[in-house]
């Protein structure tokens, strides 16, 4: 050992180390140690005197039991062999006071040893505590995961139940609307017959009032069914490219009579812009907004329907000079059955139109804006994506025209098939009044088992879609096979889904929605026969 190791400065440094240090020479005699070494090992004073043999210290510790149970001589021998093994530099063992000691042995070049002891009890306890915390945390995470899994399962079941309820509600409303439209259809056919036969009398005016009330019932049922189909996801958008100008042309045809009746100036500012979205649903939005604008605009006012480009979108505007809406109440107008004063005094209704508008815009992901001022009017706007390509040429629909001379139908042979007696009776009364030769049946079975077609060939068949034993489409096919493939046919149905129209179009069958409007029926008979 060098002299510096024996000097006072070196001794001070060793005493201030945070570990217990002992240095031994090549013969394993103690050269020096610090106070912490003696304290950690619990050695008596005479054993930390210079020249004390390491084997003496090891024998003392083994006898005291520091190396565990067993023969002390064998334990001491094993510990000395471990110290002599240069490959073992770091070990851990318990101390005499229950602490946990980390022992490091370093071999010096001259054959001496440096042995250090560190009390790592706090570190071991911290590791144990961390392990306990981790174990508790894992248990808590597992518990929370199980709880979340259970909650997600419950939510999934609740969602599935809600979806099933929505689907069930939609099916129920569809079935209920069909069942309700059946007598409603018959009632409107009866009132139309009364209006025509009692033309110019008080009875005709009463029949017109009844027909208007029945029309309001039809509108309410249609609105409720639309809301149900949107909320349940049954209403699927069908994106296409179409012309704004064509959309506005149909608005003019539909609403000019209602505007003229209130002396309201209806202006439509068209554009050649093409847009990409669902044509039918956007048309429904515009119809509802224009209808509201005319409804809540006093006589002599004005309604403007137009569009303008805004970036890559086209903004459709419906602007009126009506009663306006207070700013604080504008968020309420889109709620179902919400009708604000004084609008509720001006026009009747359930307040479903704007609720349908908002739902459709949400379904199509279209931005909807409202600006309004009480007493000055309102602006409702929707932003529709502009299409770069040109729309496909639209097939012009023949709009029903009122045929004043029903004598042209004299002798026309018309077969009516419906499973409701009232509808058959009402249809026969109406068509007979137009001079048609009418025969009726409730089903194909009734036709095949009776003499309905003996010596009589129909020129037109009016067929209900929902029959008891088959669909109206299949019934028409059967008639065409037995009467002639050229037989013109009209499918009369309360089902307004695109699927039914597509199936009918594929078989060259015209669709007429319930309740039947006599003007549309007259136009179809004139065109098809």
Image (cartoon, rainbow, N blue to C red):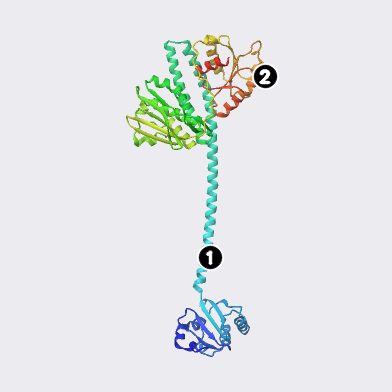
**Number of other residues with Cα within 10 Å of mark 2, as a class: few under 14, some 14 to 19, many 20 or more:** few
Residue 432 visible, this orientation: yes
Note whether 59 is above or below 132 in the view shown: below
Could you tell which of marks 2 and 1 lies nearer the N-terminus?
1
**Looking at the rendering, which quadrant does residue 379 occupy?**
top left
Q: Secondary structure at mark 2?
A: helix
Note whether 210 is above or below 37 in the view shown: above
Q: Residue at x 50, y 84 (%)?
A: 38
The residue where tag 2 is placed is 481
Farthest-out residue, left: 375
- Estimate the x, y position of residue 82 in percent, counting from the top left: 61, 80
- Estimate the x, y position of residue 285 in percent, counting from the top left: 46, 30
Q: Quarter of the image containing the C terminus?
A: top right
**Looking at the rendering, which quadrant does residue 251 occupy?**
top left
The residue where tag 1 is placed is 131
- Estimate the x, y position of residue 215 in percent, counting from the top left: 46, 22
For the residues carrying marks 2 and 1, which lies nearer the camera in this image?
Answer: 2
Residue 468 visible, this orientation: no
- Estimate the x, y position of residue 361 in percent, counting from the top left: 46, 35
């Amino acid at each position: 050992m060098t002299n510096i190791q024996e000097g006072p400065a070196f001794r001070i440094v060793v005493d201030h180390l945070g570990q217990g240090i002992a240095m031994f020479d090549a013969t394993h005699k103690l050269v020096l140690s610090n106070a912490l070494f003696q304290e950690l090992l619990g050695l008596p004073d005479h054993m930390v005197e210079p020249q004390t043999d390491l084997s003496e210290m090891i024998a003392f510790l083994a006898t005291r039991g520091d190396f565990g149970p067993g023969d002390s001589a064998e334990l001491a021998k094993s510990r000395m062999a471990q110290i002599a093994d240069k490959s073992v530099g770091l070990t851990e063992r318990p101390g005499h006071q229950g602490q946990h000691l980390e022992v490091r042995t370093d071999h010096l070049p001259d054959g001496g040893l440096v042995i250090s002891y560190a009390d790592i009890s706090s570190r071991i306890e911290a590791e144990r505590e961390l392990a306990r915390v981790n174990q508790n945390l894992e248990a808590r995470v597992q518990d929370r995961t199980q709880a979340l899994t259970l909650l997600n399962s419950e939510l999934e079941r609740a969602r599935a139940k809600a979806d099933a309820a929505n689907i069930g509600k939609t099916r129920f409303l569809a079935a209920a609307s069909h069942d309700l439209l059946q007598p409603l259809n018959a009632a409107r056919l009866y009132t139309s017959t009364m209006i025509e036969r009692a033309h110019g009398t008080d009875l005709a005016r009463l029949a017109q009032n009844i027909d208007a009330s029945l029309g309001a019932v039809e509108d309410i049922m249609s609105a409720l069914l639309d809301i149900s189909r949107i909320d349940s996801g049954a209403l699927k958008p069908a994106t296409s490219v179409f012309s704004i100008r064509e959309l506005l042309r149909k608005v003019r045809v539909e609403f000019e009579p209602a505007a003229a009746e209130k002396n309201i100036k209806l202006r439509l500012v068209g554009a050649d812009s093409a847009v990409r979205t669902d044509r039918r649903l956007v048309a429904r939005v515009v119809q509802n907004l224009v209808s509201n604008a005319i409804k809540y605009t006093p006589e002599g006012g004005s309604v403007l329907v137009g569009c303008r480009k805004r970036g890559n979108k086209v903004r459709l505007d419906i602007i009126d000079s009506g009663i306006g809406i207070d700013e604080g109440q504008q968020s309420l107008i889109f709620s179902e059955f919400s009708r604000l004063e004084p609008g509720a005094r001006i026009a009747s209704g359930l307040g479903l139109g704007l609720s349908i508008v908002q739902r459709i815009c949400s379904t199509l992901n279209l931005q909807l804006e409202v600006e309004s001022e009480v007493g000055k009017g309102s602006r409702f706007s929707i932003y529709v994506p502009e299409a770069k390509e040109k729309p496909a040429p639209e097939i012009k629909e023949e709009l029903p025209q009122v045929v004043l001379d029903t004598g042209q139908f004299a002798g026309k042979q018309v077969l009516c098939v419906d499973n409701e007696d009232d509808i058959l009776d009402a249809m026969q009364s109406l068509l007979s009044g137009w001079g048609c030769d009418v025969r009726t049946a409730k089903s194909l079975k009734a036709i095949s088992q009776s003499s309905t077609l003996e010596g009589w060939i129909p020129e037109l068949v009016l067929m209900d879609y929902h029959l008891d034993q088959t669909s109206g489409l299949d019934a028409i096919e059967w008639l065409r096979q037995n009467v002639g493939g050229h037989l013109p046919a009209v499918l009369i149905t309360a089902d307004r889904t695109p699927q039914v129209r597509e199936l009918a179009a594929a078989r060259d069958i015209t669709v007429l929605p319930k309740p039947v409007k006599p003007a549309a029926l007259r136009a179809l008979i004139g065109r098809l026969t």
